[in-house]
């Protein structure tokens, strides 16, 4: 039951990567094994007698080994959260590049036919679904490089027939290879640009405010914490809460409340620097991770408070809603944990709400 719940909680991006990972690490070795075993079967049927049997069996055994590696990667690639481990994805990509290049050369020397180069497109296509331009690009480069080397090493059966149309066929072949592999890399690029980025947006961003969501927050906080301990890079947390937000919903409706949330989110996002991160903490609360010291953070918080106070929401040209926020500022100091900072920011926020609202609280007597 716990495993089912874990899978149900996966984001769209995690689910996509999980499926692609399993398909690539298993389907590609299976495809290779089917290709090599087909050559073996055809050879023993007497339809392909001229082949080095030792090389053929070595080719089959290597594909069995690839399949075992694929099964190992598939079985050990997932973390306790049900998502593929990043280091396993990286390892799988390296292994797949090696398999594809060796497989291509194996087929080239065991089953040499004119226009066999076209199969390199099928091999690279197996990888496209990762939508990793660097990954597909490396594979393309090494396969093309090995293919060109094959023309020089064993050119007679691989290059076009020597006749009046040899040069025409050679030009056609080079153009064909270039266009097809270029198309595959373009698909990879735009697939990553639009599909994966769109999935990532749903996975890591709040759909209403377009701020980073709570699920994505841990990685950013941990990175800031590591930099603070290892590189002495200061950071602070700002906990921002919209004053009297419930009364806005009760008086003008939830649609107006959504407009207020979006206005506040936009104001906060514009007020911080590019290296800072803004998260929707929950409800009407926003958490800001500032790479700044306490004095700079207090100044930024005051700037945010004033900007929001001076930016009323004009809802449907019918109602003007004045907005204010209260902000608690928690700086990092040695020995403090992230949870300590969150609690500190929350307590300061609560103190500010209790003592007048529309203010920034940096220090208070708890």
Image (spheres, grey):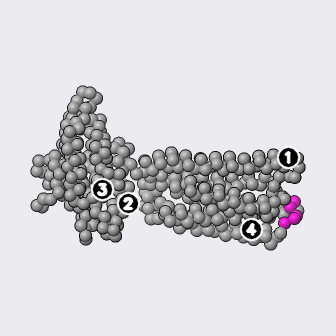
Q: Secondary structure at mark 3?
A: strand
Label 4 secondary element: helix
Residue 267 colored magenta?
no
Q: Earlier in the sequence, mark 4 or mark 1?
A: 4
Please report the residue visible at 88 percent of the width from the left and 64 percent of the height from the top: 49
Distance from label 4 to label 1 (Cα)? 34 Å
Residues 210 and 235: in front is 235
User: x, y (%) of residue 240?
Assistant: 23, 50
Assign the magenta stretch its main secondary structure: loop
In this orientation, does residue 134 appear? yes
Distance of mark 4 from mark 3, alpha carbons?
55 Å
Give the extent of the magenta segment: 47-51
Q: Which residue is mark 2?
A: 219
Q: What whole-number distance in Å separates the C-alpha atoms at marks 2 and 3?
A: 12 Å
Which residue lies at the image location 66% right of the left edge and 64% below the top edge? 99
Mark 2, Cα crowd under 10 Å, few <14 / some 14-19 / many 20+, is: few
Asked if residue 49 lies in the magenta stretch, the reply is yes
- Across and down, in percent, residue 207 comes to 38, 44
Q: Is residue 84 left or right of residue 260?
A: right
Contact check, label 2 and label 3, Cβ < 8 Å: no
Query: What residue does disc 4 label?
Result: 59
Question: Image quadrant of residue 316?
Answer: top left
Residue 241 drawn at (x, y percent)? 22, 48
- Which residue is labeled 3 in the image? 289
Residue hosting label 1: 165
Using residue 35 as the reference point, say whether residue 85 is left or right of it: left
Q: Quadrant of the C terminus?
A: bottom left
* Relative side of 363 to 318, left or right: left
The alpha-carbon separation of the residues under discs 1 and 2 comes to 60 Å
Q: Earlier in the sequence, mark 2 or mark 3?
A: 2
Q: Earlier in the sequence, mark 3 or mark 1?
A: 1
């Amino acid at each position: 039951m716990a495993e089912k719940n874990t899978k149900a909680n996966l984001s769209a991006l995690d689910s996509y990567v999980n499926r692609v990972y399993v398909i690539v690490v298993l389907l590609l070795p299976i495809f290779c094994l089917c290709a090599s075993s087909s050559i073996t079967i055809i050879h023993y049927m007497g339809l392909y007698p001229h082949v080095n049997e030792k090389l053929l069996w070595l080719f089959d055994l290597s594909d069995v080994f690839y399949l075992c590696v694929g099964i190992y990667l598939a079985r050990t690639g997932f973390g306790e959260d049900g998502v593929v481990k990043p280091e396993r994805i990286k390892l799988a990509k390296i292994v797949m590049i090696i398999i594809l290049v060796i497989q291509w050369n194996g087929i080239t020397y065991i089953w040499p036919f004119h226009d066999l180069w076209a199969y390199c497109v099928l091999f690279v296509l197996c990888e496209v679904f990762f939508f990793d331009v660097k990954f597909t690009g490396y594979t393309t480069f090494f396969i093309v490089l090995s293919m060109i080397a094959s023309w020089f090493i064993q050119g007679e059966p691989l290059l076009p027939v020597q006749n009046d149309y040899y040069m025409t066929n050679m030009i056609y072949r080079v153009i064909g290879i270039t266009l097809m592999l270029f198309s595959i890399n373009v698909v990879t690029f735009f697939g990553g640009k639009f599909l994966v980025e769109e999935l990532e947006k749903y996975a890591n961003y709040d759909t209403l405010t377009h701020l980073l969501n709570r699920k994505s927050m841990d990685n950013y906080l941990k990175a800031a914490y590591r930099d603070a301990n290892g590189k002495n890079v200061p950071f602070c947390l700002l906990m921002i809460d919209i004053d009297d937000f419930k009364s806005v919903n009760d008086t003008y409706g939830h649609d107006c409340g959504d407009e207020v949330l979006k206005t506040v989110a936009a104001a906060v996002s514009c007020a911080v620097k590019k290296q800072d991160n803004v998260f929707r903490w929950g409800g009407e609360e926003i958490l800001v991770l500032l790479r700044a010291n306490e004095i700079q953070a207090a100044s930024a918080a005051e700037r945010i408070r004033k900007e929001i106070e001076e930016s009323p929401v004009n809802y449907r040209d019918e109602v003007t809603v004045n907005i204010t926020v209260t902000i608690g500022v928690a700086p990092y100091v040695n020995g403090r944990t992230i949870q300590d900072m969150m609690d500190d920011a929350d307590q300061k926020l609560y103190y500010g709400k209790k003592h007048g609202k529309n203010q920034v609280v940096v220090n208070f007597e708890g």
